[in-house]
Amino acid sequence: MTSISTHELPFLADAAVAAPRPHDRLRLFLVVAGAMAIGAVYAGWAGEDANWDWQNYHEYNVWALLNGRYDHDVIPPGFQTHFNPIIYFPWYYLRHALPPVIAGMTMGAVHGLNLALVYWLSRIVLGHAANTMTVVAALLLAALGPMTLSEVGTSFSDILTAIPIIAGLALMLAADEPRPIRYIVAGLLVGLALGFKLTNIVFAIGLAGAALAAARPLMAVTCLAIGGAIGTIMTGGVWSLMLWREFGNPFFPLLNSLFPSPEMREITLLDRQFIPKGILDGLAYPFHWLVGNFRSSELPFRDARFAMLCVLLPIAFIAQIKYARAIFSRRDLQLLIFFVTSYAVWLILFSIQRYAVALELLTGPLIVLLLVRIVTAFRSTIPTHPVNQHASRSIFIIAAITAAWSQPTDWWRRPWSNPYAPMISSRLSQPATYLLLDKPLAFVAPLLPAGSRFYTIADLALPILPAGKYDNRIRAGLKEPLPGGMWEMHIKGRPFRAEALAAYDLMIDATQPCVEIEGAQLGSTNVACPLRSTGS
C-alpha cells in the first residue's frame, strides 16, 4: 500500500471509501430502512397534506393528463397547467389508491431516502473523521431542516428530486479515480431531476462547477453533459416536445421572450418576489433566516444552517492560510464549489426557499466537514485520525444546537382524523361549465361530474388573450351549454372579479342561491354561483 504523509491528511477521505468492509450490506439495509422509517413516522405525525400547489396543479395536472382534459379545459391552475406533471404521478396514485394516512406515510418513507444518501455522502467526505458522533451530527442537521420537514409526506417535488441530485453528487465525489461512467451516471441523475422540474437547473450548474475541480475536468464536464442531456430528455423530453408542438415554446409559459408563443405576451415569466435587492442584501439572507425573517418564503420559518456556513467557511480558509496547512482535499473543494455555485445561482434566479431543499440537506455534511477541517487546522500536530472523542462530541453539540433552532414551515396540513372528503351539493350533480376566478381551485375539478368544463379566466400571470386558442375554446364552450348550466367559482372572502365575467358577457344570477364546497385548507370555503348572460 502506498504510504501517505501527514501533510496529505485531507486526502485520506479518498482512501476511506476505496474498499468495502465486512457487514456493509447489513449496514446499508439498516441505514436505508431506518431513514425510510424516520420519514414515514414524521409524515404520520405531521398530518394530511393540503398544500397550495397540490390544490392548484399537482392534483389537477395528473388527473387532466389521465383523463384527456388538456384538450377541453382552459388552464384551471393558471400558468402552472403547463408544468411537467410526471413527477406528481407517484403521489397522485398513492393518494387515490390507499387510505390517506398510509399514502402520506408511504410518501414520507420515500422522502426519507434523502437521509440515507446524506449518510453515504457524509462518510465519503469525512473519510477517517466519519465516526458515530460526526455522522449522526450531519444526519441531525439534514433531518431537521425547516423546508425538509415541511415537505416530508407531501406532494412537493423539491424533496423528491433532491434524491437523484444528492445521489449524483455523492457518486461523483465517491470516485477514487476519474472514471467516465461515474460522471455520466452522476449527470444522468441530476438530469432526471432537471427534466422533472426546471428549477433544478441550479444544481446542474453547481455540478458542472464542481466537475471543473476534478482531476480531469474536461472529461468530467463532458461526461456530465452527456449524462445530463440523456436524463433531462428521459423525464422532460416528451413534455417539452408537446409544448413546442402546441405553443411553439418547449418551456411554455416560461422563456416566452426567447420562444414567443401567440398565447401570451413575449416575456420571461419568473417569480421574482423573493429576489434580494442587491449584493449586500443577498449576503444577509442567511442571517435573516437565522432570526426568523422569512423573506424567501411565503410562510414563516427559521434556520441557522446557512448562517453557520457563512461563519465557518471563512474561518476554515483563514486557518488554512495562517497555518500554511492544506486542510481541504479535492473532494472537499468539489463539495464546496457545488454548494456555493448552486446557492449563488438559486439566489439570483429564484430565492424561493422551497427550491433549495437539496442544499438544506447538504448543509449537514458540509457544516460537519468544515468543523472537522477547522479542528485539524488548529491542532499543533496532525494525527492519523483528525478528530478525537472530545472534538467529535463538541461537533455533535454544535450541530444539535444548530438543528434545534429550526422552525419548519407549515404548508397547510389536516389532522388524519379529519381527512379531506367534501360533500358536493346535489345542485352540482350534472356536468356543467365552471369559470374559475381564483387560485387554487383546480383540485375541485376531479370532484365534480365527468364531462364538466373548467375555464380559468382570471390568471394574472397568463391572461387569456382575445381571439387566441384559449379564448376561442371558452367562447365555443359557452355557446354549447351543458345540462348543469354555467357557474363561476371563487374562494370565500376573496375580492370578487366581476370584470373577468363581463369579458364574456356573463354575470351572477342573483335569483338563484350559490353553493359552498369545503376547501382543502382547514377553515376555507369555495363558492360556486350560477351565471346568466348580461344580455349585451
Image: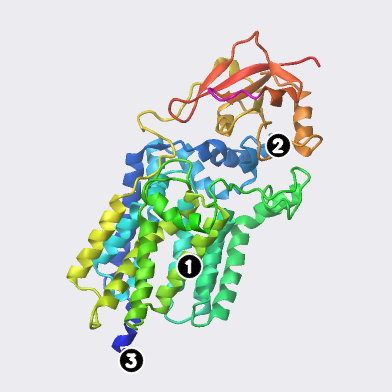
| Mark 2, residue position | 463
Dot 1 surroundings within 10 Å: few (below 14), some, or many (20 or more)?
Answer: many
- Amino acid type, callout 3: Thr
Q: CA distance from mark 2 to mark 3?
A: 67 Å
In the drawing, what numbered circle is on residue 2? Answer: 3
Q: Give the position of the N terminus as an image quadrant.
A: bottom left
Q: CA distance from mark 3 to mark 1?
A: 30 Å
**Residue 110 seen in the figure:** no
SS at mark 2 in the image: loop
The quarter of the picture where residue 31 lies is: bottom left
User: Looking at the magenta stretch, what is its main secondary structure?
Assistant: loop
Above or below 415: residue 532: above
- Sequence-first tag of 3 and 1: 3
Q: Give the image location of residue 117, x and y in percent.
A: 39, 62
Q: Which residues are magenta?
A: 492-497
Viewer-nearest of discs 3 and 1: 1
Above or below 20: residue 279: above
| Mark 1, residue position | 338
- Amino acid type, callout 2: Pro
Observer-nearest of 160 and 388: 388
Observer-nearest of 250 and 426: 250
Dot 2 surroundings within 10 Å: few (below 14), some, or many (20 or more)?
Answer: some
Q: Residue at x 38, y 28 (%)?
A: 418
Above or below 104: residue 342: below
SS at mark 1 in the image: helix
SS at mark 3 in the image: loop
* Left or right of 24 in this view: 470: right
Q: Give the position of the C terminus as an image quadrant.
A: top right
Extreme bottom residue here? 2
* Left or right of 427 in this view: 139: left
**Residue 346 seen in the figure:** yes
The quarter of the picture where residue 41 lies is: top left
